[in-house]
């Protein structure tokens, strides 16, 4: 047994043994789980993929004379202004009023991080304390006050793969799905995925410090659509979308390499977000959890050609097979394509490993665990 305090003391002394989730797998095969539990202190995990439930809170500061904003456009992308006078929330999937689905909130967020100038246009309701009714100016991330990345749903604990039985190409958040089972798309970093490496949420919870968009951030709760009751396989891994995280961090610390706006053809705009989460090896059970490999992580394949909430399943497949580039689907060889980037997840896990090894990043024990008794409810059409 090891504690967070003991592991942090080893980090402070420069003695902590830190491996990525990819590196710990061969060690476990060679030395065994007990050796991993004894010798390894921290395992780093990561993901880099499109996360539509992303966005930023921004505070512009007061103009002279002041304005109480009730309609705000940033590079012609609408931001929600139903907050205080000069606070807004810009959602990653918000679309430009001029360019539509070719440009949106995710691109504005990336450009803010890259220190580019953003055109701000705002309209307000004239009051005695806020007499200004309209303002046009430019801002940068350095000229505004707070810029808080706050993502309501990130880091899915597994996600279903997608295919298409219909006769036409479908344009979805999983990318383009070719007709007649032309491809299978998937979007999880497999053996590097954070919540797959801590399936019972023992070390990942409210207060956990993380790598977020190139800076440091925190988990502030379970994410929307958190679904811990998802069906699991014999390895304890959910066979589809399960747990999620709500995260926050200071956008001013972040990098445009790890926050990238994206246009998904025929679907809209999203934001690719890089997240890395350290997992302390407290005991043999945690050591066993973090040594799971792609061969043992399965997901389900669903047919997006059926436009319903419940889609037909075409069985289960592991991430080793998905990452090989081709799988068998009803005796047909079908190409596979990732929506998320394994290479970027590997890079983030390595950076977080270096931060910890160098004593620049310490672990925080969660102040509260993520809930395990939440039920995911559908929307019923009852009128």
Image: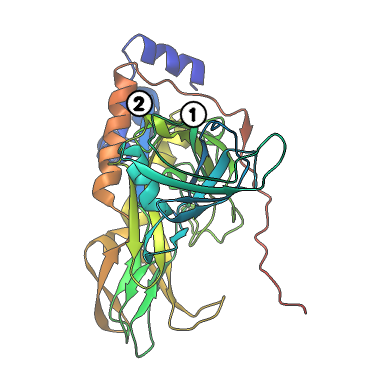
Q: Earlier in the sequence, mark 2 or mark 1?
A: 2
* Disc ID at residue 40: 2
**Identity of the residue drawn at 65% across and 39% down:** 131
**Identity of the residue drawn at 63% across and 41% down:** 68
Q: Quadrant of residue 181?
A: bottom left
Q: How many circles with numbers are drawn on the protein? A: 2
* Disc ID at residue 145: 1
Near mark 1 (Cα within 10 A), the count class, few <14, some 14-19 or many ≥20, is: few
Question: Where is residue 130 drawn, in percent x and y?
Answer: 66, 37
**Identity of the residue drawn at 34% across and 16% down:** 359
Q: Is label 2 in a helix, a strand or a loop? A: loop
**Identity of the residue drawn at 30% across and 80% down:** 178
Q: Is 146 in front, or is 135?
A: 135
Near mark 2 (Cα within 10 A), the count class, few <14, some 14-19 or many ≥20, is: some
In the image, 328: left or right of 238? left
Q: Is 264 in front, or is 289?
A: 264
Question: Where is residue 245 drawn, in percent x and y?
Answer: 53, 45
């Amino acid at each position: 047994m090891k504690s967070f305090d003991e592991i942090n003391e080893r980090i402070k002394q420069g003695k902590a043994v830190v491996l990525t989730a990819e590196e710990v797998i061969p060690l476990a095969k060679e030395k065994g789980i007990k050796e991993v539990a004894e010798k390894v202190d921290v395992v780093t995990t990561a993901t880099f993929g499109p996360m539509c439930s992303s966005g930023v809170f921004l505070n512009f500061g007061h103009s002279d004379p002041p304005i109480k904003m009730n309609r705000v456009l940033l590079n012609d992308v609408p931001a929600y202004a139903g907050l205080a006078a000069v606070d807004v929330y810009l959602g990653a999937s918000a679309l430009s009023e001029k360019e539509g689905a070719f440009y949106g909130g995710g691109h504005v967020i990336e450009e803010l991080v890259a220190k580019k100038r953003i055109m701000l246009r705002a309209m307000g309701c004239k009051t005695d304390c806020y007499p200004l009714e309209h303002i046009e100016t430019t801002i940068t991330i350095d000229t505004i006050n707070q810029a808080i990345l706050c993502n309501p749903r990130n880091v899915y604990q597994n996600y279903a793969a997608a295919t298409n039985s219909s006769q036409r190409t479908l344009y979805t958040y999983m990318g383009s799905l070719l007709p007649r089972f032309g491809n299978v798309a998937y979007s999880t970093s497999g053996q590097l995925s954070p919540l797959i490496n801590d399936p019972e949420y023992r070390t990942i919870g409210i207060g956990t410090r993380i790598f977020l968009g190139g800076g440091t951030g925190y988990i502030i709760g379970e994410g929307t659509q958190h679904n811990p009751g998802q069906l699991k396989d014999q390895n304890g891994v959910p066979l589809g979308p399960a747990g999620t995280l709500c995260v926050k961090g200071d956008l001013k610390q972040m990098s445009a390499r790890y926050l990238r706006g994206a246009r998904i053809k025929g679907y809209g705009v999203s934001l690719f977000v890089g997240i890395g989460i350290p997992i302390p090896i407290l005991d043999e059970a945690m050591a066993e959890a973090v040594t799971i490999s792609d061969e043992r992580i399965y997901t389900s394949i669903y047919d997006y050609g059926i436009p319903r909430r419940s889609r037909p399943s075409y069985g289960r497949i592991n991430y080793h097979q998905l990452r090989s580039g081709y799988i068998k689907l009803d005796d047909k060889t079908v190409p596979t394509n990732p929506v998320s980037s394994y290479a970027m997840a590997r890079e983030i896990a390595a950076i977080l490993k270096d931060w910890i090894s160098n004593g620049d990043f310490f672990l925080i024990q969660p102040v509260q665990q993520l809930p395990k008794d939440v039920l995911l409810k559908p929307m019923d059409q009852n009128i």
